[in-house]
Amino acid sequence: MAAELHADLAFRPVPRDIRLASATNGDEKRHKHSRSSYSEASPLTSRNNSLTFRPAKRPMPSPNKTIAIINASGRQAASLIRVATAVGYHVRAQLRNLEGVVATEVATNPNVTVLRGELYTKERPSETVQVDVTKNGPISGIGVNHALIQELFRGAQLAFINTTFYGDEQRIGEALADAAKRAGIQHYVYSSMPDHHAYNKEWPSLPLWASKHKVEEYVKKIGLPATFVYTGIYNNNFTSLPYPLFCTELQDDGSWIWQAPFHPDAKLPWLDAEHDVGPAILQIFKDGPRKWGAGKRIGLAYEMLSPKEACEVFSRGVGRPVRYIHGPIETKVSIPEGYRCQLEALEELFGLGHDDPAKQPPYFGDAELENTCPRVALELWEGPRGLEEYAREVFPLEEQANGLRWMLDDADDAAATNHQRNGNGGGGGGGGGAAHPHHINGYMTTLAQMAQYSDGEDEDEGLVMRGLKRDDEEWLA
Ligand SMILES: NC(=O)c1ccc[n+]([C@@H]2O[C@H](COP(=O)([O-])OP(=O)(O)OC[C@H]3O[C@@H](n4cnc5c(N)ncnc54)[C@H](OP(=O)(O)O)[C@@H]3O)[C@@H](O)[C@H]2O)c1
């Protein structure tokens, strides 16, 4: 049976009615300069004269715009929700559940209205009845949750839509575009990716990206005022977990090896999705469709680094050697069939540059688009987090959240070094003996402290593509 739109779909977690009376409200008729921001009792009131009048203290003026966002717990969407709501935008956010740190963060944000439910429906066909593909779609039993999608855009003027391969990505993408059109969305930003075959008939399509390209074509066809962003390789794809493509495999000597089919010297676009997608998309909305509409495409990447360069900066950040090996994708965990096909095609596509980096197809398909990186991205947002900073500040924390322990060895080493430097624990305040936390640098102190409280269980979940933090993140490219 089709999943239904539940009455509690529009879930408002906390009261949010904090809007102050406007200047036209009867309670608040005085001119904004008619009283000081200082209290009457303040000695500073005497400073208020016609030249120094200050307006009353008031909340930041709100843009009074609502953004419709799907997959709100995803890295791209959550990044936008953080920055947009911080400056007063309202968000209607689709979440499939309220579990997890990010979903909780989104659902408790006072500027967010949560629509809880999946974008697809599961209609399990009865075994005795012939499956009607015209009803059930190309993937038998999977439909589109039109009711939720229609509700998503109610009262919204803007939309940031990042579809994923769960369900039927093309049909969901088209249904979202149709509903946005009906709702009169003024600016629709779609997070797309290229179909390489559309740029060069000798290049294979990457199946999970090709459906995004089809959605992009559809959005253009129906005439939505739209911008398409192509996001670079996320910094936090890297992991020591044995996931294919971006696994930095830990070696006995503490170094890492990254093996992938990209030519060692061919440039690739990189992006810190959590840090930098939000501010860039917000700027696109602020500039509006006049600047970015009419189907413009933007390559959202802040660094163009070859795999060798990426390893160098990563190594500088994390303080351990990282070596690149140009080789096939190793799949050591069980992965979904769709992702396996994607990886096979990716190996074939980027294998085209095997002997010559100039022959490797551009990651974004279109060399012209890639040549605008990072210039255009920096026009939108000037404060990105590069791979080196990511590796230094965030990677160890994410690794530990995924159940890995190497950073604790680093913390022990750093503690031992300081211990020796300080004369066997005698220096710097606090009891003697073991390392003193204030002798260790920032994050290592935190990690060392966290280790004290960990239960010490080794959470070896075996060779399946699943980690503590990475549950269900199977589409790493
Ligand atoms: N990684 C990269 O380098 C890269 C680069 C360019 C484009 N992309 C594209 O970005 C998209 C992913 O976006 P993202 O990185 O922002 O998301 P993400 O952080 O990977 O999160 C995935 C989202 O999908 C949801 N999800 C997980 N399992 C699901 C299921 N069974 N059914 C329905 N939804 C499910 C998650 O919801 P829960 O939190 O509830 O699990 C979450 O909202 C993909 O299409 C990918 O191709 C990735």
Image (tube, helix red, strand yellow):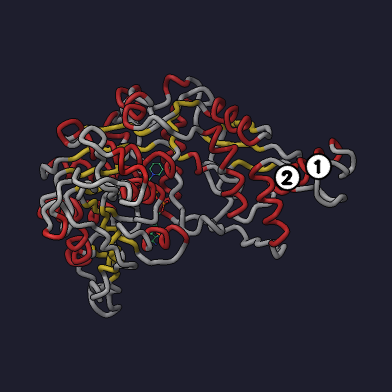
Element marked by disc 2: helix
Q: Which percent across, then down, holds residue 148?
A: 22, 65
Which residue type carries mark 2?
His
Left or right: 21 in relation to 301? left
Q: Residues within 10 Å of mark 1 (few under 14, many from 20)?
A: few
Residue 107 visible to an observer of this rendering: yes
Query: In this orientation, which residue lies closer to the viewer: 389 or 199?
Result: 389
- Disc 2 residue crowd, few under 14, some 14–19, many 20+, Cα 10 Å: some
Q: Quadrant of residue 212?
A: top left
Reply above or below: 200 against 438: above
Residue drawn where x is 17% and y is 61% of the image: 150
| Above-or-below relation of 159 to 256 | below
> Secondary structure beneath disc 1?
loop
Drawn side of residue 146 relative to residue 142, left or right: left
Q: Quadrant of the C terminus?
A: top left
Q: Position of residue 432 (x, y in %)?
A: 87, 50
Q: Quadrant of the N terminus?
A: bottom left
Asked if residue 140 can be seen in this view, the reply is no
Query: Nearer the N terminus, badge 2 or badge 1?
Result: 1
Residue at far bottom of view: 128
The Cα atoms of the two marked residues, 2 and 1, are separated by 9 Å
Q: Which residue is mark 2?
A: 438
Which residue corresponds to the image point at 61% horizontal and 45% vertical from the top-left?
396
The residue type indicated by label 1 comes to Gly
Q: Nearer the viewer, residue 363 or 395?
A: 395
Q: Give the residue at mark 1.
A: 428
Q: Where is residue 459 shown, x and y percent of the image?
A: 65, 62
